[in-house]
Image: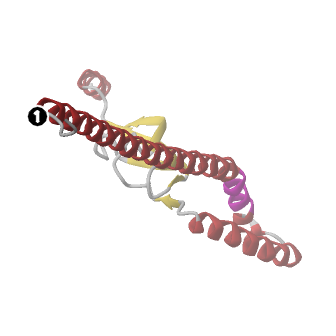
Amino acid sequence: MDTPLPNEDIKELSKEEQLQLELEEQKEKYIRSLAEMENTRKRMQKERQEMTKFAVDQVITDFLNPLDNFEKALSFADKMSDETRNWAMGFKMILTQLQDVLTEHGVHPFPSLGNTFNPHFHEAVSVEETTNHPDGYILEEFSRGYKSSERTIRPAKVKVAKHPKQESLATTADTDAEEKN
């Protein structure tokens, strides 16, 4: 009676099938774990790159005000003596090198004067009521704005045109009419 009965054969297959199913289940868990580890690695790498980019942008931002002051100081060199102009020429070369460093890091100044105010690129520090220009027209730029390929590093500080309120126009017209009489 060494030959197995059909019921025993079914039980034997059933154990093999169970082991096979368990093996497949473990393989799936292993593959999911590998994928999860890879996704975590990629996410951490991306976060690290973003933190580095943010830190570089922050350092660059800290250099922009002294750089602006350097430019302003050198703008008066033409009115100075020959000796001072010679010194200024060397400092202008240094300024150009600093500007090149900004460019290498993808940071560029952007024009504002004559454009329309955009809160993503401009900070309105002054408003002038006028009918000579449309609302939001940038009349003056107090400090230049800078942006990288991805975002605004420093918004430009500007003076913006604004139309006077209609009440103000009516009051002005009444006052003008009274003065003529």
Q: Residue furthest right?
A: 83
Q: Residue 71 in magenta?
A: yes
* Residue 154 position in % (x across, y down): 54, 46
Most foreground residue, 90 or 150: 150
Q: Is residue 2 above or below residue 95?
A: above
Residue at 26% across / 27% down in the picture?
169
Q: Residue furthest front?
A: 1
> Does any portion of residue 124 appear in the rendered image?
yes
| Residue 70 located left or right of residue 81 | left
For residue 117, which quarter of the picture? top left
* Residue 53 position in % (x across, y down): 57, 51
Task: Quarter of the image for the C terminus: give it.
Answer: top left
Q: Is residue 72 above or below residue 82?
A: above
Most foreground residue, 30 or 79: 30
Q: Secondary structure at mark 1?
A: helix
Residue at 43% across / 48% down in the picture?
139
Q: Which residues are magenta?
A: 66-73
Q: How many marks?
A: 1
The prevailing secondary structure element of the residues shown in magenta is helix
Residue type (three-letter) at the residue carrying disc 1: Pro
For residue 111, which quarter of the picture? bottom left
Q: Crowdedness of circle 1 by 10 Å Cα count: few (<14), some, many (20+)?
A: few
Most foreground residue, 38 or 172: 38
Q: Which residue is mark 1?
A: 6
Residue at 88% across / 77% down in the picture?
83
* Residue 13 position in % (x across, y down): 19, 38
* Residue 161 position in % (x across, y down): 37, 41
Q: Residue 181 in magenta?
A: no
Residue at 73% across / 65% down in the picture?
74
| Residue 68 located left or right of residue 158 | right
Most foreground residue, 21 or 62: 21
Task: Quarter of the image for the N terminus: give it.
Answer: top left
